[in-house]
């Protein structure tokens, strides 16, 4: 089923060319597509307590060279939020792979922001045939890199959170004090249930506790780009150097930007990404 996406776009991005809902066995997944279908596929995966809308400012910069596909992970955005669903990282990755299969995509460069990079890594582990290369944007390599108190994963004591609580939760996602947090991002948190908020946060911790991302990525042997705003207030920016353990990994620091460079400065974030995909993206035959 394909329906128009009437949601407003962060920072004035364009409306999605196609918005659809894919019925999966364990919950409906919302998908957005932009750009020519015969261009190389680029899958964008959002972080925790976010949605496809976090990528809106980037999309117009990427569609000239790509078929840009975004999904709302289960529990987020317009996707289902079942109380009994599995929000484990491998299950989120499996759904992303099924979504690409349903869309007829055989090869994709996969880009993940924050915990979306964890899902991207799991997808590459499960489907090395599908993932040609990976780009991680401000994705902490291990729990040792975290600078957010563990108690933050429990979320606010009341649900839905008050506006003040929401802004406090979101504030560390940006580098500048007083940064005007887009209302759409606050709405994404409001749209979650307390269960999905807590469970998805815990799922990322659990996955990183098992094995660090550089260890996982070294085994995969996939081309890797790591983009990191060097004023990140959630992950130590110096931890990006941990990815140098992955043979051939490219590390791109963005001075003056925080945890969400895709929102704070889309053009600067898109520049290294497009240079990377120009080399590694695969056009479908």
Image: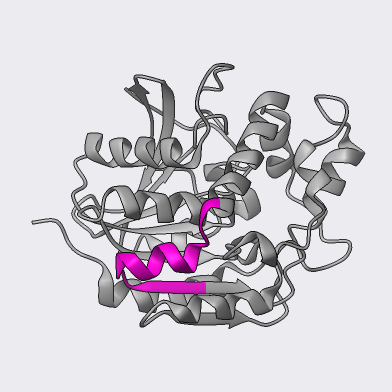
Q: Residue at x 35, y 38 (%)?
A: 94
Looking at the picture, the colour scheme in use is: one colour
Residue 109 screen position, x and y as percent: 32, 61
Q: Is residue 107 above or below residue 254?
A: above
Q: Quadrant of the C terminus?
A: bottom left
Residue 272 screen position, x and y as percent: 46, 78
Q: Which residues are magenta?
A: 210-226
Residue occupying the far left of the picture: 285
Q: Residue at x 36, y 76 (%)?
A: 276
Residue 251 screen position, x and y as percent: 50, 81
**Per the image, is 26 magenta?**
no
Q: How many marks?
A: 0
Image quadrant in which you'd find residue 17: top left
Q: Residue at x 87, y 48 (%)?
A: 168
Front-most of 169 and 198? Answer: 198
Image quadrant in which you'd find residue 2: top left
In the rendered structure, the answer to whether residue 279 lies left or right of residue 196 reads left
């Amino acid at each position: 089923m394909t329906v128009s996406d009437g949601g407003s776009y962060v920072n004035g991005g364009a409306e999605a060319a196609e918005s659809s809902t894919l019925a999966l066995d364990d919950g409906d997944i919302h998908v957005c597509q932009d750009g020519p279908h015969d261009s190389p596929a680029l899958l964008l995966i959002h972080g925790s307590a976010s949605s496809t809308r976090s990528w809106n400012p980037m999309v117009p910069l990427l569609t000239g060279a790509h078929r840009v596909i975004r999904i709302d992970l289960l529990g987020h955005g317009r996707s289902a939020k079942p109380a009994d669903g599995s929000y484990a990282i491998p299950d989120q990755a499996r759904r992303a792979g099924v979504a690409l299969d349903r869309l007829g995509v055989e090869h994709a460069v996969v880009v993940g922001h924050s915990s979306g990079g964890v899902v991207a890594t799991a997808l590459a582990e499960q489907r090395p045939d599908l993932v040609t290369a990976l780009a991680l944007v401000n994705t902490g390599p291990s729990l040792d890199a975290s600078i957010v108190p563990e108690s933050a994963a429990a979320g606010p004591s009341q649900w839905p959170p008050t506006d003040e609580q929401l802004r406090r939760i979101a504030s560390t996602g940006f580098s500048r004090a007083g940064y005007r947090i887009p209302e759409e991002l606050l709405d994404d948190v409001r749209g979650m249930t307390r269960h999905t908020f807590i469970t998805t946060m815990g799922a990322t911790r659990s996955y990183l506790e098992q094995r660090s991302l550089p260890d996982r990525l070294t085994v995969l042997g996939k081309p890797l780009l790591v983009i990191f705003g060097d004023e990140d207030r959630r992950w130590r920016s110096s931890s990006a150097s941990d990815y140098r353990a992955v043979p051939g990994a490219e590390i791109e620091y963005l001075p003056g930007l925080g945890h969400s460079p895709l929102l704070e400065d889309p053009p600067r974030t898109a520049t290294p990404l497009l240079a990377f995909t120009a080399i590694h993206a695969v056009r479908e035959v």
